Image (spheres, rainbow, N blue to C red):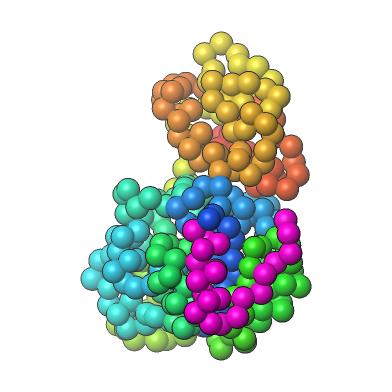
Amino acid sequence: MELTETLAATDAGVARAAALLRAGRLVAFPTETVYGLGGDARRDETVARIFEAKGRPRFNPLIVHVPSLGEAEKVALFDDRARAVAGAFWPGPLTLVLPLRPGAGLSPLVTAGLGTVAVRVPAHPLARALLQAFGGPLAAPSANPSGRVSPTRAVHVLAGLQGRVAAVLDGGACEVGVESTILGLAEEEPRLLRPGGLPVEALEAALRQPIASGGSAERPSAPGQLASHYAPAAAVRLNAHAAETGEILVGFDPVRGDLTLSETGDLVEAAAALFHALREADALAGPQGRIAFAPVPETGLGRAINDRLRRAAAPRG
Ligand code: TXA
Ligand code: MG
């Protein structure tokens, strides 16, 4: 990739950032918590490139940023409790995990194939201006390489992601400096999935009930959470060079299949296709069926693809 552009906090800077996002490119932007690595949450390849840029070894789900509660309701299902906390704390450093609205149009990579989605309305004026100018939902994890600390200034973003992102919108230092608090409201019991910029006491006061800690998509504490990851009904075999009788084969160059992750061995294309291929192969194979996946190299995005495939192939009880 070419040099990363630094864009000023002006109308022209925001317009340029929005144009890059509309072209499917990645733009880092300030929020009140930390800088986010933003991309169009509806485009599979763009979301795959977010994981590639961060060098994330697995597809954990990303937060979807929207400009308003109204826009949030287009991607997630809100109940009265969710509306109450959103009304009290949005815009602000609060992320809600809610049931995914059917037909929301998000890339399945954003939710890691889950039936829930994390949404937030940021308060930073530049983030809000960018969301308005772009006019769609932005997937945005913190704008740092995987395993490094989250950036709170544009120079931090450049130190980690120079050349891996088209532009960074420079909004100076982030006020809050830690990530948003993540509240899970997809189940009956509210759960604190990540402590962050909004104190949990404030949420407990708004909900008028204590909030249990623990459990996240990354490190599930309840067994059901991992099971809710999309798991094919069909049995899955990995590192297949050819289909055995009755198997649906998902190819990756040079292996040709009934479907393919990438005919040219392109890992970004393969990541973008992964969740669609899992569902399509499952539908073709049927409930008693079997799916075989061609080998995918264990480099770059291939590590995250293989992590997901190994979990799809793991024995289930
Ligand atoms: O402050 C923030 O929240 C920053 C700024 C840029 O907005 N963003 C951020 O995003 O921290 P990210 O993508 O790094 O946070 C994603 C975390 C995941 O690691 C996971 O713990 C949780 O959000 N998450 C996302 N979707 C989830 C889901 N459907 N169920 C449970 N947890 C989810
Ligand atoms: Mg992070």
> Left or right: where does residue 64 sit relative to residue 156?
left
> Left or right: where does residue 205 sit relative to residue 313?
left
Q: Nearer the viewer, residue 1 or 11?
A: 11
Residue 230 in view of the camera = yes
- Residue at screen point 63% across, 72% down: 168
Image-quadrant location for residue 140:
bottom right
Q: Residue 75 location in percent, x, y?
A: 35, 58
Q: Nearer the viewer, residue 203 or 49?
A: 49
- Residue at screen point 48% across, 37% down: 276
What span is in magenta? 1-22
Q: How many marks?
A: 0
Report if residue 81 lies within the magenta region. Answer: no
Q: Nearer the viewer, residue 238 or 215?
A: 238
Residue 191 in view of the camera = no
Task: Point out the image quarter for the N terminus.
Answer: bottom right
Q: Residue 8 location in percent, x, y?
A: 60, 80
